[in-house]
């Protein structure tokens, strides 16, 4: 990028950023009212394309209004939490919008969850109703008796992709919105920016998934930032949307950005590396929302001479690693990468607004990278008790100051909120959000003096795999429930050719007998697919700290390496439902990055 282009890009970003003036919390503005405004402005413009169905903004708003009228008639009111368990499809977006129009709060449930974690998510936000897609009836049916909800509190939504018309089970009622008024609800005007829009569940650092509070103000600001600053979207743009809508990226980037810009989306249930370029060309998608793993999967596809001959020119997401950044841009003809860094529940983040390479960008809020002891998993403080900033280029824990300009909305659980707040960081009484991530400052050339960063790794009891945060404590509790397990220690390990960390568990078996088939069945049935440890290490005893916290550093370092680990190792191969002994042939495939993970 030339110096003149650099300056023009930065000036454009500054001009747009100055327009993002914060609005008062009592401003009557919400996700629901913004959809209505967009439908009024561009009623005949395409809003979404999904599995052969195309809806305009006007048609989508009418559908959402009909759903809102129906849900209101069934007793849903402002402030109510309604769990939404549904795959990516138009009805998902319509349900979120309908609830927002009422002033109710959608609890966006991870579609991979089953049993205890699923039950926890629904109940932790005191859901008064559940909306479930036909495609996900099975996991809900398994916990239905524990929900404490009547059959008329569970709404079933047909999935046209499934064979047969489909009939709601006897323990639910069909969300029958056909025939309802398509007009906007008057009460939508009473929903303000400070009201809750939806809950996004995050693993956080420990325990079961936690519900992050997403207000209409947060949705508005984040979506506007992605649409205007990182993507520079217009009505002519169409985004390829394959990220789960239960993720903040799915809601902020894919849905929120088109509300602000008036553009459209090509919506897909799940990502498909083999179909992406063909569908991008077919539907003329100019933007792509990613997580880093998706970019790597695309690069794993056999190169074709016309890979760069596609309409995608702008990408936005997080997790694109420096080792594949330039290859990804060059091979697929990408002009702009709007990489960002931030947590769903965080009070601030970093944005690559200047289109620099191999960086998550700069942070507009007060922040600091501080020294952290990775081996002992603890913050390093000075003799006076304050944190110490790292040197340029040194990895440090990212902390973001909590202030009136960088509010931390936190979780539904006040205790979980407090655990993310560090006090007396640089002076008595100050408060910072603990990201739980290590970052480092990098040189990106001229950037108006704003320091730019790279993501390094997660710390503590959480690792990231397949785009999901995995809580080691949560998975450990599940595995401890297996009959032959005395206790276990879950941790993340790096695999060549993949992003994030794969799960591994050290297990001390009762009476020394591991009973591998039974443990395999227990993990497959109880643990979500993305969170299943790929490796098992059988240990006799578990090493602990002086405070009886299980040590992970040495386990992480030895990982699954046959020449370093003295204990029996077992592996869950791709497509398999049972762990087997790790042999040297498959170990070599792992090292070569050809094992299929």
Image (tube, rainbow, N blue to C red):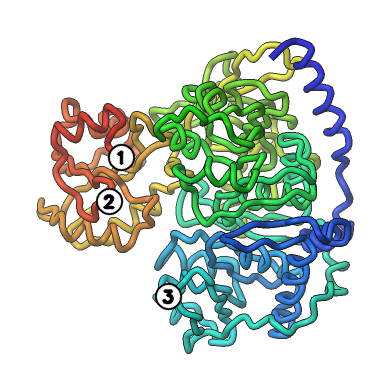
Nearer the observer, 559 or 169: 169
Badge nearest the viewer, 1 or 3: 1
Q: Residue at x 20, y 62 (%)?
A: 483
**Which residue occupies 66% across, 28% down?**
336
Callout 2: helix, strand or loop?
Answer: loop
Label 3 SS:
helix
Q: Work out how far the residue at label 1 is from the one at label 3, CA to CA, in angstroms.
A: 33 Å
Alpha-carbon span between mark 2 and mark 1: 9 Å
The furthest residue to the bottom: 170
Query: Where's residue 574, x and y in %?
Result: 28, 46
Left or right: residue 77 versus residue 490 is right
Placement of 329 over or under 347, stated as above or below? above
* N-term-proximal mark, 2 vs 1: 2
Q: Which residue is mark 1?
A: 596
Q: Which residue is mark 3?
A: 143
Neighbour class for label 2 at 10 Å: few (<14), some, many (≥20)?
few
């Amino acid at each position: 990028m030339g110096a003149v282009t650099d300056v023009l890009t930065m000036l454009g970003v500054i001009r747009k950023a100055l327009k993002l003036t914060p609005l008062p919390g009592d401003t009557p503005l919400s996700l629901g009212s913004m959809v209505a405004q967009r439908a009024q402005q561009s009623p005949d413009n395409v809003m979404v394309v999904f599995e052969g169905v195309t809806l305009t903004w006007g048609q989508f708003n009418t559908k959402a209004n009909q759903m809102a009228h129906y849900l209101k008639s069934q007793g849903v009111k402002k402030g109510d939490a309604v769990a939404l368990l549904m795959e990516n499809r138009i009805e998902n977006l319509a349900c979120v919008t309908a609830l927002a129009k009422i002033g109710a709060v959608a609890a966006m449930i991870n579609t991979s969850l089953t049993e205890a974690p699923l039950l926890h998510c629904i109940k932790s936000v005191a859901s008064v109703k559940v909306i479930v897609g036909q495609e996900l009836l099975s996991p809900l049916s398994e916990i239905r008796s524990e929900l404490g909800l009547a059959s008329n509190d569970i709404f079933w939504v047909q999935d046209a992709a499934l064979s047969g018309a489909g009939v709601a089970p006897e323990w639910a009622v069909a969300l029958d919105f056909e025939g309802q008024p398509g007009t906007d609800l008057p009460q939508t005007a009473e929903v303000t920016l400070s009201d809750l829009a939806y809950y996004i569940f995050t693993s956080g650092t420990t325990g079961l998934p936690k519900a992050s509070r997403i207000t209409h103000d947060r949705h508005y600001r984040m979506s506007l930032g992605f649409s205007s600053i990182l993507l520079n979207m217009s009505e002519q743009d169409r985004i390829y949307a394959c990220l789960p809508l239960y993720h903040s990226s799915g809601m902020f980037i894919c849905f929120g950005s088109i509300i602000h810009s008036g553009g459209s989306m090509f919506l897909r249930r799940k990502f498909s590396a083999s179909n992406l370029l063909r569908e991008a060309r077919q539907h003329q998608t100019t933007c792509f929302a990613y997580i880093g793993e998706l970019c790597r999967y695309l690069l794993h596809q056999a190169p074709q001479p016309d890979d760069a001959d596609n309409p995608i020119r702008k990408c936005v997401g997080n997790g694109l690693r420096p080792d594949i950044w330039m290859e990804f841009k060059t091979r697929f003809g990408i002009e702009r990468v709007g990489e960002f860094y931030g947590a769903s529940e965080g009070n601030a983040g970093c944005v690559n607004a200047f289109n620099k390479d191999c960086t998550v960008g700069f942070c507009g809020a007060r922040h600091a990278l501080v020294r952290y002891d990775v081996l002992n998993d603890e913050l390093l403080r000075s003799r006076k008790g304050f944190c110490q900033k790292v040197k340029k280029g040194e990895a440090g824990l990212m902390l973001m100051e909590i202030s009136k300009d960088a509010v931390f909305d936190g979780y539904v659980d006040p205790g979980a909120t407090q655990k993310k707040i560090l006090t007396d960081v640089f002076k008595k009484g100050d408060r910072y959000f603990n990201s739980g991530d290590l970052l480092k400052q990098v040189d990106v050339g001229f950037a108006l003096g704003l320091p730019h960063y790279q993501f390094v790794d997660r710390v503590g009891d959480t690792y990231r795999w397949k785009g999901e945060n995995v809580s080691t404590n949560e998975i450990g509790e599940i595995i401890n429930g297996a009959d032959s397990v005395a206790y276990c220690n879950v941790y993340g390990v790096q695999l060549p050719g993949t992003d994030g960390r794969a799960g591994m568990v050290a297990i001390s078996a009762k009476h020394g007998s591991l009973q591998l088939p039974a443990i395999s069945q227990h993990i497959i049935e109880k643990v979500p697919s993305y969170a299943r440890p790929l490796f098992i290490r059988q240990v006799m005893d578990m090493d602990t700290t002086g405070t009886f916290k299980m040590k992970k550093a040495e386990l992480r370092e030895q990982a699954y390496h046959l020449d370093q680990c003295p204990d029996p190792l077992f592996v869950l191969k791709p497509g398999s439902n049972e762990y087997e002994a790790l042999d040297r042939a498959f170990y070599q495939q792992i090292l070569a990055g050809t094992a299929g993970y």
